[in-house]
Image (cartoon, helix red, strand yellow):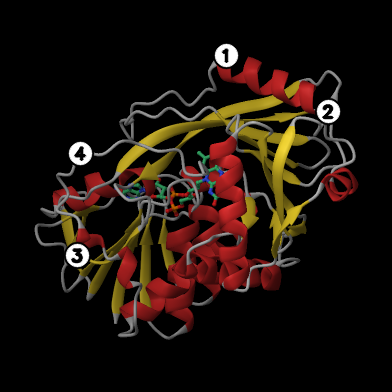
Amino acid sequence: MSVAIVGAGAVGLTAAHDLARAGEDVVVFERGEVGSGSTGRAAGVLYDAYAEDVDARIGRRAIERFRELSGEGDFRFHETPYLWFAHAGDEHRGGAIREQVPRMQHHGIDAALVGRAELVELAPDLETDDVGVAAVARNAGWTDPATYAELLAGKARSAGVEIRTGTEAVLTEGGGSVRVDGESEPFDAVVVTAGAHTARVVGEAGYDLAMKPYRVQALTTEEGAETPMAYDATEGFYLRPDSGGLLVGDGTEEVESDPDGWDREADKSFVESATARVEARFGREVAVDRSWAGLCTATPDGDPLLGWLSEDLYVATGWQGHGFMRAPAIGETIARELRGGSGIGQFDPTRFSGDEAFPIVEGMAL
Ligand SMILES: Cc1cc2nc3c(=O)[nH]c(=O)nc-3n(C[C@H](O)[C@H](O)[C@H](O)COP(=O)(O)OP(=O)(O)OC[C@H]3O[C@@H](n4cnc5c(N)ncnc54)[C@H](O)[C@@H]3O)c2cc1C
């Protein structure tokens, strides 16, 4: 089978690699460089702490593959627990955490509510006096997402994949061919993993997709700390250890972004508020090393759009801020479904007509 994959992010590269390893002929079209979309801007927080069974299964499989790949090339999976908490008095989010944890445990996820003594032991440098309800997931870690993209691109090439960077693909009406510089090339299947551009790309083939890109932000600090990865659900920001420093993320803009026309720089207000939060949590001043913005993709129900749009056009997007951590399992699912295996019914992209009005909800929100 000949397969075109549009987009060399974490999802497209994993799918390309898995398809080629299964013996298929794969060409990846990438308008920029490998990993130059959202993957190269992601925070690399990795966990399987999901309360829905399908999400838990995908999360667990993804972590398993990250762990297997760790040590190949520059890619490292840094084992680090994931802590999430709500402030005392935040009944809504505290209740949500209490309700989620037993559901996660029911799906075999290594998650547990954490009492005060354990919280202090787990995060000795973190100021947690205001925490009301906390939980920890231990099948978790972090990585530099660019190293995953580089590794998978190399492994895909070794398996026979042709990756054409600097090559913008345009779909033909109906979707079975890819047009580059006016020349059409037919494929048995075209898989669109074009991140924030996915709706635009499949739109060229005549399909409407219920997906909206939205902007999020992150920064790194020069100073590090002994800390697990942590998500403050009440204030809506997360942090993780980074090489030598900390990485902090939030700054979600709950409005639709144009996938080309958006500000790549972090907002001054985000940098100030994220820095203030870190300083309050660690009780000391920190200096910002780097800050940036990137795009995530939202859907009406928060679930991905993953599956066939027609007999030869397949789509994979709508990760609601969780696309990188699921990429190893999603890529595997794409490869299996393309080769006639089962997909994930709940993520069927045709469950929406594409013209739905819906609000953008931050992906980590409880
Ligand atoms: C600041 C930030 C922090 C994040 N943190 C996390 C995190 O901690 N954990 C997590 O799981 N997720 C995180 N995410 C989300 C994550 O980045 C995405 O969900 C994930 O990278 C999506 O991967 P992808 O392969 O689907 O898309 P992308 O990585 O965006 O790849 C799509 C590619 O398609 C290419 N493309 C687009 N149109 C065309 C075309 N017409 N022809 C050819 N190529 C095309 C683009 O150039 C791009 O390289 C974060 C995102 C941001 C911005």
Q: Nearer the viewer, mark 3 or mark 2?
A: 2
Question: Is ligand 1 closer than 8 angstroms to the Cβ of mark 4?
Answer: no
Q: Which numbered circle lies on residue 268? A: 1
Element on which disc 3 rests: loop
Residue type, numbered disc 2: Phe
Instruction: Give how far apart the Cα atoms at labels 4 and 3 are.
Output: 20 Å
Whether residue 55 is situated above or below residue 288 in the rendered picture: below
Q: Earlier in the sequence, mark 4 or mark 2?
A: 2
Q: Nearer the viewer, mark 4 or mark 1?
A: 4
Q: Which residue is mark 2?
A: 282
Is 149 positioned to the left or the right of 135 in the image?
A: left
- Label 4 Cα neighbours within 10 Å, binned few <14 / some 14-19 / many ≥20: few
Q: Which numbered circle lies on residue 357? A: 4
On the question of residue 21 being in view, the answer is: yes
Give coordinates of residue 109: x percent, y percent. 64, 68
Q: Which residue is mark 3?
A: 309
Instruction: Give how far apart the Cα atoms at labels 3 and 2 are.
Output: 48 Å
Instruction: Give how far apart the Cα atoms at labels 1 and 2 are.
Output: 21 Å
Residue situated in front as seen by the camera: 145 or 87 = 87
Whether residue 324 is situated above or below residue 19 in the rendered picture: above
Residue situated in front as seen by the camera: 54 or 225 = 54
Residue situated in front as seen by the camera: 192 or 114 = 114
Q: Which numbered circle lies on residue 364? A: none
